[in-house]
Structure formats: C-alpha cells, structure tokens
Image (cartoon, rainbow, N blue to C red):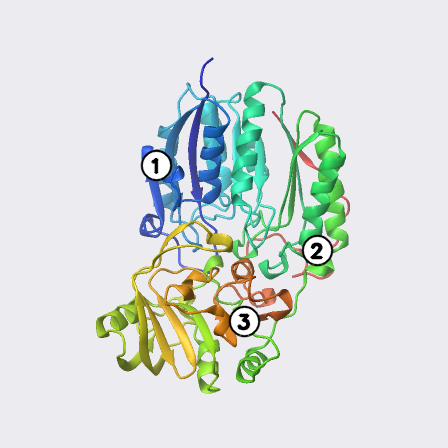
Amino acid sequence: MRKPRVALLGMILESNRFARPANLSDFKNLNWLEGDALLVDARSKTPALAQEFASFVQAMDATGPWQPVPVILAACHPQGPVEEEVFETYAQKALAGLDHTLDAVYLCHHGAMAATHLDDPDGELAARIRTKVGPDVPIVQTLDLHANISDQMCDAVDLICGYRTNPHVDMIERGEETAFALRRILSGHISPQVAHVKLPLVPASVSLLTPSGPYGELIDYGQRRQAELAGAILNVSIFGNFVFSDVPENGVSVVVTARDDLIEAERLATEIADRAWNIRHQFIRQMTSISDAVELARFEQPEPVILSETGDNPGGGGSGRTTALLAALIEARAQGVLYGSFYDPALAAEANRLGVGARFDARFNRSRGDAPWEQWDTPLEVTAEVAALHDGTVTGRLGLTAGRRMKLGPSALLNIGGISVVVISDRTQTADPVFFEMFGLDIADAQTVCVKSRGHFRAGFAPWFTPEQVYEVDTAGLTSPVLENWPFTRLPRPSFPLDPETVWSQGQATSFST
C-alpha cells in the first residue's frame, strides 16, 4: 500500500493592526524552519514550534505509514501586520515545496494574520495552495480560536479545526484530531462538507474565556450538538475573532464540517450562530481600575490576588513595556509583589553586566522611540537591586507553554522596595510560573502577582489563584479592551458591542462542498 505523502507547512501570526509591522527577523527570532528541521523539532520531547504541529506529526506517526513532506513553518510572536516582502517570501517557499505527487496538505496557522498589503493573508495562502495542488488533494488546517475566518479560507480547505479552550491548553488534542480526520478522509470513508456563518459580533478577547461565560457555553453547546447528531458532524469550531486585527473578516464565526451531508452542516452552523447572537450582551466585561488594583496590592487580602495588565498583553501584540501599573505600585510602596515580565533587553543587559547584588538606577524604556505603537511605553527610572540573573532558556511548566522550549534571552530579577520585577529580552506574555520560578521564586509566597498577559496566565497560575482571585486591570496599551477608544477602519460596521443597536437576523450559512 502506498504511503500517503502529506505536505507540512504554515504561517503563524496574530496581527494587531496598531502594533509595529512584523518583519523577517521577528519570525526568525521565534520560528522559521524548513525541510527536515521541522520533523526533528516536531518529534523531539520539548518542541519549540507550535504544539498542534508537533502533535499532528506525532499522531500521523502513530496511526500508520505515511511520508511527511516538511516544507516550511514560520511563526512570530503577536505583532502588527506582516510586511509584504516577508509574506511573499514565505508564500514562494511554501508553493515551491508542493507538487503533483502529494496526497494531502496540513496547514498550521493562527488565523488572525493581517498583512501590510492584504486583509486576509491566511485566506490568500490557503487559496494559492489550493490552486497549486488542485481540487482533489485534501487540505486540513488547525487554527487558534481567535482566528478571523473568511469565506476564502473555508472555500480552499476541507477541514478547519479550531482550538476549543481559552486559556489555550488543547493544542495537542486539536493536532491529533486533525490527523485522525485526515486519515479518515484519505481512506475515502468521508467527504467533508463545510458551512460557515459570520456574525456582526466583535467581542474583545477578555470576554472569550471558555471555562465559564458565554463563549465557553457556546463551545460546549456545539460539542453536545455534534455528539447528538449521530456521527453526521466531523467538527464544530467557533471562532471568537481577534478584534485588534481590524479587518473585514472580523466577527464571531461558526464553522461546521459534516462528514458527508452539507445540509446538516448548514443547519447546525446557523443554529449555533443564532444562539450566539441571542446572548451577545454577555460578551461585555468590566475592568478593574489601576487605583483599585493598587489598593488590592497595598493592603493584605484574605487571599492573594493576581492582576492582569489587559492593556499590555504581548500575547495580543502588546509591547510588554508599559509602566503605568508598575509606577503606581512603586509609588504606593506595595509589598510582597511579583511583577512579570517587563520586556527591556537594554535593562536586562545592564543588570547582567552589573551582576547580582548591584544597586543601580534602573532605567525602563531608555530606548523608547516616537512611533505610535510606543506611546504608552513611558520611561521610568528607579533605584533597584539585581536579585538574580538567568539566561532565559527554560521549558514551560503549566498552561499555554507547558512542555515547550522558550528562549527569553538574558533575564534579570530586580528588587524595587517590596516589588520583585522580572525583566526579559524576548517579548513574551507571562502565562507560566516558570517566568518567576527560573529565579527561585515561589508563587505561594507572594501577596500579589502582576502579569503582562490577558488570559492565558489563568491556566498557568491556576494552582495558586481561583477565578475569584483574578483581577483584570484597565491599563492603557496596544491591547486595551476598551474598544470604543480604537480607530477601527476596516472591521464590519455596524458590529456589536461597538454599535449597540446592531441588528442581525438568523443568517444563512455559506457552504463549501468538496
């Protein structure tokens, strides 16, 4: 029996329209792997590349003979739109690795990428790949649940499998699910039929948690309905959108893939979309002010608290360099605070040069420029002591980055009064306790933990903080969830909650028969 030849490729970027455009070095600093290097990393015990990609490869390895055709995987931390030259360089390499001998293609994308010259580069790539391999080669794709889904994307692929958890902890399962589905498609036992419904609903990411709340209820409902339909449905994926991409494809999307019956997919997609619209008002959340957050940190609480800087989440394109909350904590002389992680390579380098025990005038944001995306990166100068140093090479322990290799670059722990500040050289959200633990800190000893992370920290810090101990702080920055403050120009209008009077009637699914 001939081993199926499956091409492996993808481009992973969550684009924040208001952040600095993503250049080639941004990708190469995280992941730009080609050829056999992809398989080596994917099959390692602690992959550095996307977990769903590694999981897909390992699941295919475990389920029978196959011939992987590793092409290219490019990944970048959340940033602005990808530069045109970078996008076209990737596209050229991706298409060059595809030929007429392929039996299938696996695409590993985030799904909320924008480009300086395109609003829908994810859909554009899928369409170009479909043109290259022809209409009969199955294409399966994994996406983050914050993806902005387009009809072009749905039309080009045979299966879209989105994450179902936020904080994201199911990437391994989604990679496996996609591999198992591809095996069934290749066996000829199913003929996937895709239906897509887009809603004029553009919630901020803080309202897209899945352990509870409206989004989690929708995803749970979709899974129950899939189970009830007697095997007719292959996949139900509900995408919350990433509003900061500011693209025409913004909006909650329901994508349902039936095994064979397109009508079943259409009915279920429309049913779920109608349910989502009926609970749209539940997608609005209230934030904690900086002053209230400081009060929480100043006075000992019955239980420790964790403060999320919602406005400066590197996991959504934030700079990781805003100082408003840190400055307020310092001014209030808060005690027992762990603060992480501040992205400042120059400050980390100086601390490493001075060594442990040195006291110095720590200058945060000394290299700040005057670009629009730096407007909240206010310089801060304060006396600090170098408490500990680390090279930043760690393996994630809990939540989003569990088991994943990370290179945070030269890092330092600075003591500023009663505040311990982690400074890193790679712009990464603090979603894992390892950011503190690499310096020998125990989360259990802290009265207050502050993290530059929007929501993924909830999984990483769950052993210490229940949802009732979490406070989302209304800080300014590139990921501020106060949507009315943003100059959106491309996303569909009217859309709720930006336009409270938005009207939507039960929509007809857009169908894509294979």
Whole-number angstrom distance, CA of label 2 to CA of label 3: 22 Å
Q: Give residue 248's position: percent from left, percent from top.
A: 57, 48
Whole-number angstrom distance, CA of label 1 to CA of label 2: 40 Å
Height in image: 309 above or below 117? below
Height in image: 501 above or below 222? below
In this rendering, position of residue 272 left or right of residue 109? right
In this rendering, position of residue 380 left or right of residue 509? left
Residue under label 3, please give it: 307
**Label 3 is placed on what type of residue?**
Leu
Is there any visible trace of residue 31 in the rendered image? yes
Looking at the picture, tell me which residue is in the foreground, 508 or 207: 207
Q: Earlier in the sequence, mark 1 or mark 3?
A: 1
Residue under label 1, please give it: 40
Q: Are marks 2 and 3 in contact (CB under 8 Å)?
A: no
Q: Residue at x 47, y 49 (%)?
A: 114
Residue under label 2, please give it: 214
Height in image: 235 above or below 467? above
Q: Earlier in the sequence, mark 2 or mark 3?
A: 2
Height in image: 64 above or below 164? above
Q: Give the residue furthest to the top.
A: 1
Whole-number angstrom distance, CA of label 1 to CA of label 3: 38 Å
**Label 2 is placed on what type of residue?**
Pro
